[in-house]
Amino acid sequence: MTQRVRVAIAGLGFGAEFIPIYQAHPDAELVAVCQRTETTLAEVADRFGVTGRYTDFHAMLRDPGIDAVHINTPIPNHAEHTVAALRAGKHVACTVPMATTLDECREIVAAVRETGRKYMMMETVVYSREFLHVQDLVANGTIGRVQFLRGAHYQEMAGWPGYWEGLPPMHYATHAVSPVLSLAGALAESVVCVGSGRIAPRLAGKYGSPFAVESALITLRGSDVGAEIARSLFETAHEYVENFTVFGARATFEWEQTQGAGHVLHTGEIPKSIEIPDFAHRLPPEIAPFTTRGVYDDENEHLSFVQGGGHGGSHPHLAHEFLRSIVEDRASAIDEVTAANWTSVGICAHASAMDGAARVQIPDYAESP
């Protein structure tokens, strides 16, 4: 592909963060935005000078001038919108999670194969500067043989849009799952999960999930390494954190215990604080500045930034990888099979918790349906 990829963004809350990135990227042209609320649509589109404007997602898909759609709509709509966009001939990037059921994951995988379009789940943690640094430590032998991995995501979702209320913790687990599976270099095979504590009946009644915390042990395909995941969403007091720890034969990386305390590298029995570098140098210079700044700031805040701290500089890396997969005609780094596996860990983990910690096998999405 020699011409620029013509991109549309659907969902302009968190999604607005990506507008200037696509506008600056040398491989992209941001041609349209979509938002159900007309006032928000006009405000954001005016601010960034976007001429293509839609309040109806499916109407946007009928626009032949759009090559790719970046979906940032509510979680319950991810699968529906992804499949519709793929079948409309658009490449798709979608924020996490991929879907909320195993059948939806299967439907997306099938739609990618049927249409030949590219798909990427835009998981922020595996493009954060912390992850990229630890990935280098594993690759260059500093960590040594990986022996065990642990991931966690603690977040209080009170005050977020209503569809979040009572969501099973593991149904939004990819921020904890993705770094451990990526660093292990394997997909998940099975999961056993324990549900713990209780949330208020008003919340529990929304999805039929009573648990305040869900904690899972994961076996990996073709690997003797195990992983542990913990997740909470409501009524569990803890500082917001998305973290991971990698236990290695030579060194162990441990995420800071409280924000600002500093990440630690254990070598033998000697822990030392380490500085995490930025990775803007891996990006085209036009979008490199977006690892350290974005749309949202102290005067214009979004909850994903108030709590998430800008997702570790990951946004331009995600957009770049999605665009390059299209330009180079290859699978993205988080393609449909990988995304389905990472998402299914959480879906199957919650099913395990609801079934008294029974072991649940993760579907093999690489097999033909």
Image: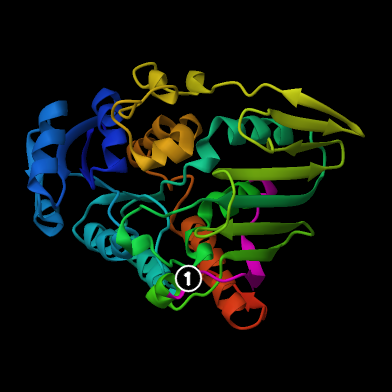
Is residue 321 at least partly visible in the picture? Answer: no
- Camera-nearest residue between 337 and 168: 168
| 177 in magenta | no
Q: What count of labels does the image hold? A: 1
Identify which residue is drawn at 49% across, 75% down: 209
| 186 in magenta | yes
In the picture shown, does residue 236 fall above or below 123?
A: below
Identify which residue is drawn at 30% across, 34% down: 18
Identify which residue is drawn at 31% across, 34% down: 17
Across and down, in percent, residue 308 comes to 47, 39
* Secondary structure state at the residue bearing disc 1: loop
- Camera-nearest residue between 191 and 307: 307
- Camera-nearest residue between 155 and 66: 155
Identify which residue is drawn at 67% across, 78% down: 357
Q: Is residue 78 left or right of residue 198?
A: left
Across and down, in percent, residue 183 comes to 66, 45
Q: How is the image coloured?
A: rainbow
In the picture shown, does residue 268 fall above or below 343?
A: above
The furthest residue to the right: 269
Is residue 361 at least partly visible in the picture? Answer: yes
Q: Magenta part of the protein: which range? A: 183-201
The residue identified by callout 1 is 200
Q: Is residue 176 left or right of residue 29?
A: right
Q: Which quadrant is home to the C terminus? A: bottom left
Q: Quadrant of residue 196?
A: bottom right
Q: Quadrant of residue 130?
A: top right
Q: Which quadrant is home to the N terminus? A: top left
Q: Amino acid at mark 1?
A: Ala
